[in-house]
Image: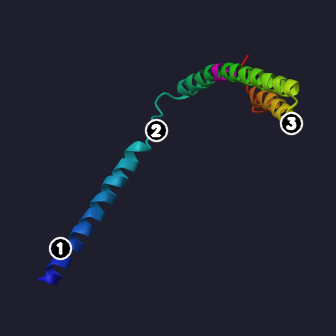
Amino acid sequence: MIKNTYFIACLRRALLLVGLSVFTSAAHATCGSVNYTWGTDALHEMQVFILVMMEYVIGLLYAIGSLVSLYSATSITIKIHNGEQGITKNIMMLVGSIMFLIGATIVMPAFFGINWR
């Protein structure tokens, strides 16, 4: 009786393994399929969409960068007036954020050949 129970458990595990592998391969076959019927029109549409979204993202980066720069400049001014330590670290952080903003919005798109204006 014990051997029969062990055999049934092994058979269930084997059937479960086979079933999962069949369903998994079927899911992979349908999930990775690509529809090539649109052709170059879809690629052009995608490029236009990405360039439009890039304009919005760059505008958002400018807005966030300006707010962070104003906050950092205000905290530097307050630290200078109070005579606190660590002013140079805040100044370096402000300069670094400005350099990142310029690099992320102007230099990197130009490096990849994207002219969004």
Does the rendering let one see residue 86? yes
Q: Which mark is residue 34?
A: 2
Q: Residue furthest front?
A: 82
Marks 2 and 3: CB-CB under 8 Å?
no
Give the amino acid at mark 2.
Answer: Val
Whole-number angstrom distance, CA of label 1 to CA of label 3? 74 Å
Membership of 57 in magenta stretch:
yes
17 left or right of 58 in image: left
Mark 2 neighbour class, 10 Å CA radius: few under 14, some 14 to 19, many 20 or more: few
Q: Which tag, 2 or 1, sits closer to the chain's start?
A: 1
Residue appearing at x 74%, y 20% in the figure: 66
Residue in front for this viewpoint, 108 or 84: 84
The residue segment tinted magenta is 54-58
Element on which disc 2 rests:
loop
Q: Which mark is residue 8?
A: 1
Marks 2 and 1: CB-CB under 8 Å?
no
Whole-number angstrom distance, CA of label 2 to CA of label 3? 59 Å
* Residue 110, picture quadrant: top right
Residue in front for this viewpoint, 52 or 100: 100
